[in-house]
Amino acid sequence: MSFVNFDGSVKKVNHKPKGVTELVLEISTKGLGNSIQNLAEMIDNDVRVEIESDVVRYNVQINAHTERPIVNYQVDQSGVVHIAEPEPEQLEAELGLPAEKPQIEEKPMEIKREVVDRFIQEGMAPEQEGFPENMADIVKRRIEGESYRKLASELEMSSGAIVDLINDYRAAVAPLAEKWWDWKEDQANEAVPMQKDEEAADVDLDSSQSVKDDSDGNDQKEEKDGAA
């Protein structure tokens, strides 16, 4: 039995006669490697295929007037994402000051699936209303290779339903994952200059020691020359 795992792009979906749909995929030959022979052996054979997008698409509610998100997030020092304090216009509304009710629009966004999956795998995704309490664990099992069929059987739902549930959960935590990922990148960028400063300090110490050693050597040489 042949097995091929690859990353590719969906190029065409053609609806053909007799209820047949033709799917055209484009795959990097280099990325496919020796598996191309396995694919050749599958021609005209029945296969089981699972295709997942490498991006997570979600919507963000924004104030149509300011074009700013209605809900903002912040990350604490431990990497936990929280809802940020309300914007000034929101505070005015809460204090009873006259303010126009913002017109809310939904802005389509997308983020790499690997970012969302890493957010979930590292245990940073909080519980989401409308999802099972252990939803993060369910998605984590899927990320680690468990089949949709097995998860669906345990949850007593169809494979299609579990796929939709997992996709919806990824979309729900995507805004938090994006903020968390930005925080992680900032932490990494801050660590690099510190490391460079430490390396520069080590070089300075080595240089100082070298100068001191040369100075001691010259002093000893002068003493010998004087004695002679």
Image (spheres, rainbow, N blue to C red):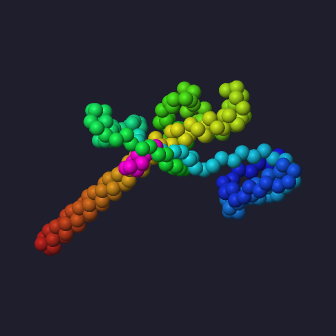
Percent position of residue 78, x then y: 38, 37
Q: Is residue 61 left or right of residue 200?
A: right
Which residues make up the magenta segment? Answer: 61-69
Q: Residue at x 57, y 46 (%)?
A: 56
Q: Is residue 226 visible?
A: yes
Seen in the picture, residue 78 relative to 186 is either above or below; the reply is: above
Q: Residue at x 56, y 47 (%)?
A: 57
Q: Is residue 60 left or right of residue 10?
A: left
> Is the magenta region chiefly helix, strand or loop?
loop
Percent position of residue 27, x then y: 70, 59
Q: Is residue 75 visible?
A: no
- Between 198 and 24, the residue placed more toward the observer is 24
- Between 96 and 2, the residue placed more toward the observer is 96
- Between 27 and 171, the residue placed more toward the observer is 171
Q: Is residue 145 left or right of residue 127?
A: right
Inspect the magenta stretch and tell me whether residue 66 lies in it: yes
Inspect the magenta stretch and tell me whether residue 1 lies in it: no
Q: Quadrant of residue 11?
A: bottom right
Seen in the picture, residue 42 relative to 171 is either above or below; the reply is: below
Q: Residue at x 74, y 51 (%)?
A: 4
Percent position of residue 90, x then y: 33, 38
Q: Residue at x 75, y 46 (%)?
A: 49
Percent position of residue 153, x then y: 72, 28
Seen in the picture, residue 121 relative to 226 is either above or below; the reply is: above
